[in-house]
Image (spheres, helix red, strand yellow):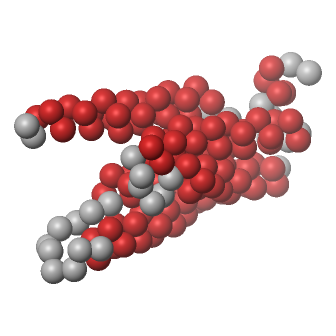
Amino acid sequence: MSIANLWSPDNWLGILLRLCLAMFVGGIIGWERQLRHKPAGLRTHMLVSMGSALFILIPLAIGKNGNERDAVERVIQGIATGVGFLGGGEILRGSQEEIGKAEVHGLTSAAAIWVSAALGTAAGCGLWQLALIGALMSLFVLRVIKELERRSRK
């Protein structure tokens, strides 16, 4: 079996690799959120990422009639919209914790969920380099940029 066939969505090993990659890249973000004691932590991000990969793999696996690109594009639009609702719930929940204050909380958590979905989508498409680079860049933003923001407030 060649390397190209290894990542193919047509065999169980390719499917397994893509789903494991999705869980891994979602887990990178989820672990960082878990360490910061955010409600959407490791399991949530792993599931969002893997779910996105699953949604992508469905049209890839059954799209043998030549319309798979169109189907994948529609699935990506659906993932972005659907995960937006999940992120909106995170923002709403965070904003209502302190009633009486006009502050919005949870924007970064919502964005992290959205990015986890994008990373899972990349993994589901077999774009492992994009998924890994995106996960590392996300971790950089969540860790390093957060520290720079904290220092600039002092």
> In this image, 85 relative to 25: left or right?
left
View extreme (bottom): residue? 100
Please give the name of the residue rendered at 32% of the width and 60% of the height, measured from the top-left corner: 106
**Location of residue 99 in the rendering, given as x and y in whole percent from the top left corner:** 22, 80
| Image quadrant assignment for residue 11 | top right
**Location of residue 17 in the rendering, given as x and y in whole percent from the top left corner:** 76, 35
> In this image, 108 relative to 134: left or right?
left
Q: Quadrant of the C terminus?
A: top left
> In this image, 18 relative to 102: left or right?
right
Q: Nearer the viewer, residue 98 or 53?
A: 98
Please indicate, yes or no, whether residue 81 appears anywhere in the rendered image.
no
Q: Nearer the viewer, residue 12 or 34?
A: 34
Please give the name of the residue rendered at 14% of the width and 73% of the height, measured from the top-left corner: 102
Q: Nearer the viewer, residue 81 or 91?
A: 91
Q: Quadrant of the N terminus?
A: top right
Please indicate, yes or no, whether residue 30 appears anywhere in the rendered image.
yes
Please give the name of the residue rendered at 72% of the width and 43% of the height, measured from the top-left corner: 19
Is 17 rendered above or below residue 73? above
The image shows a total of numbered marks equal to 0
Q: Nearer the viewer, residue 30 or 121?
A: 30
View extreme (left): residue? 154
**Location of residue 131 in the rendering, given as x and y in whole percent from the top left corner:** 56, 34
Please give the name of the residue rendered at 61% of the width and 49% of the height, measured from the top-left corner: 46
> In this image, 114 relative to 63: left or right?
left
Is 83 rendered above or below residue 111? below
| Image quadrant assignment for residue 101 | bottom left
View extreme (right): residue? 1
